[in-house]
Image: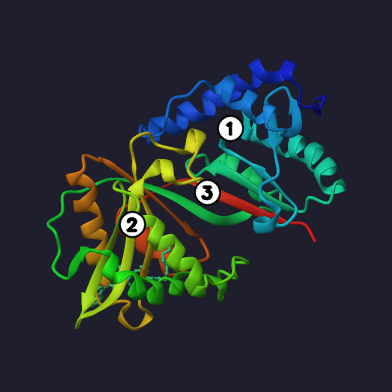
């Protein structure tokens, strides 16, 4: 078996592998997009992705923002496929030698959660599950008591509750390197939300105080859900937090139902969200609401 650097001449063979992988994925999740698979891989090459190819497997990765992820390589949804998952390990080995030589030590890969043998190949390269992407068919729900759409009068209360999400994620066992949001950052985000007419902050009130905030918008607003991982026409549940004092008492359930009702009333049939797999609250809460994992983002840090 010869493993060589990925080049344009491999596009057709790689597209065939990706077509097989993604069409199998779409049999489980028909909401995932059909695509021009060759064009998806060609776009990665144009964006500077590098990698390796062998008959039956390829991998292509490129660097994401260093400020956010450190010196890194991302293998996006279209950046890998294998007819024999064992060969994925060979192409990654070849590509990673070059990446690590360049000092790129934080590695990420978006892998179909339904493809257990491909996942296993990645796990046996030292990768672990960092993040889940979830999707559901939006159920019919009555508008729940206690929830309403936020108005600009709520900005300061939203600024107060917003940082509880990033605070939670900086702690064990998530240990996110993304710092806790400052009130200024939250205020800028919230004010930006109010400039849109296609998204909404839904708030849950208890004794006159806002104790929960979910943001719902079109999937196009999400950078993380792109290319083969972006179900067309889906709603995106992009932010969710309840006050630590009220967790476990129904605020999150009410906000979820309101998110479903809001999205359905606007004609959406599918909703997408995502979570850190190490977030003990969200990684349990979303699947219990019916979200099924489409992709897992895997991570390996080479020290
Ligand atoms: C995820 C999150 C938004 C959920 O909100 P919440 O307010 O805890 O949600 P609820 O209280 O409605 O539901 C939590 C659990 O309590 C249960 N519950 C709700 N009301 C209850 C009650 N009166 N008695 C007993 N259990 C109850 C729910 O059924 C749910 O359990 P289940 O998932 O096993 O069914 C919240 O935990 C949170 O803010 N976490 C930190 C930030 C975060 O992770 N955000 C999401 C990022 S992706």
Write down the residue under mark 3.
296
- Give the percent coordinates (x, y) of residue 41: 62, 26
Mark 3 or 1, closer to the camera: 1
- Asked whether residue 209 is in view, the answer is yes
In the picture shown, does residue 82 fall above or below 261? Answer: above
Q: Is residue 150 found left or right of 229 in the rendered image? A: left
Q: Secondary structure at mark 3?
A: strand
- Give the percent coordinates (x, y) of residue 185: 50, 66
First along the sequence among labels 3 and 2: 2
For image coordinates 37% across by 34% down, the residue present is: 232
First along the sequence among labels 3 and 1: 1
Q: Which residue occupies the foreground of this view, 198 or 61?
A: 198
For image coordinates 69% across by 28% down, the residue present is: 45
State if disc 2 and disc 3 touch (CB < 8 Å): no
Image colouring: rainbow
Q: Quadrant of the N terminus?
A: top right
In the picture shown, does residue 163 fall above or below 217? Answer: below
Q: Secondary structure at mark 2?
A: helix
Q: Quadrant of the C terminus?
A: bottom right
State if disc 1 and disc 3 touch (CB < 8 Å): no
First along the sequence among labels 2 and 1: 1
For image coordinates 19% across by 64% down, the residue present is: 148
- Give the percent coordinates (x, y) of residue 124: 68, 49
| Residue 129 location, quadrant | bottom right
Q: Secondary structure at mark 1?
A: helix
- Give the percent coordinates (x, y) of residue 255: 25, 64
Mark 3 or 2, closer to the camera: 2
- Asked whether residue 242 is in view, the answer is no
Q: Is mark 2 within 8 Å of ligand 1?
A: no
Marks 2/1: CA–CA distance = 34 Å
Write down the residue under mark 2.
194
């Amino acid at each position: 078996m010869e493993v060589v650097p990925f080049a344009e001449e491999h596009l057709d063979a790689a597209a065939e592998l990706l077509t097989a992988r993604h069409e199998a994925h779409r049999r489980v999740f028909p909401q995932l997009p059909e695509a021009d698979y060759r064009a998806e891989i060609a776009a990665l090459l144009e964006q500077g992705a590098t990698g390796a190819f062998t008959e039956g497997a390829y991998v292509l990765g490129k660097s994401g923002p260093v400020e956010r992820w450190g010196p890194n390589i991302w293998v996006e949804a279209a950046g890998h496929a294998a007819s024999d998952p064992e060969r994925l390990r060979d192409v990654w080995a070849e590509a990673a030698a070059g990446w690590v030589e360049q000092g790129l030590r934080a590695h990420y890969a978006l892998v179909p959660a339904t493809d257990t043998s491909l996942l296993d190949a990645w796990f046996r390269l030292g990768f672990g599950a960092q993040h889940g992407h979830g999707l559901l068919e939006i159920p019919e729900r009555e508008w729940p008591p206690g929830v309403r759409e936020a108005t600009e009068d709520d900005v300061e209360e939203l600024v107060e509750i917003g940082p509880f999400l990033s605070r939670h994620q900086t702690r064990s066992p998530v240990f996110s390197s993304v710092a806790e949001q400052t009130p200024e950052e939250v205020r800028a985000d919230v004010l930006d939300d109010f400039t849109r007419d296609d998204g909404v902050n839904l708030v849950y009130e208890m004794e006159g105080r806002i104790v929960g905030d979910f943001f719902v918008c079109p999937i196009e607003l999400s950078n993380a859900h792109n290319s083969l991982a972006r179900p067309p026409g889906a709603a995106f549940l992009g932010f969710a937090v309840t006050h630590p004092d009220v967790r476990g008492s129904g605020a999150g359930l009410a906000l979820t139902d309101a998110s479903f009702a809001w999205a359905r009333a606007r004609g959406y049939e599918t909703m997408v969200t995502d979570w850190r797999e190490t977030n003990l609250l969200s990684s349990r809460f979303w699947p219990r609401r019916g979200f099924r994992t489409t992709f897992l983002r895997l991570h390996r840090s080479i020290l």
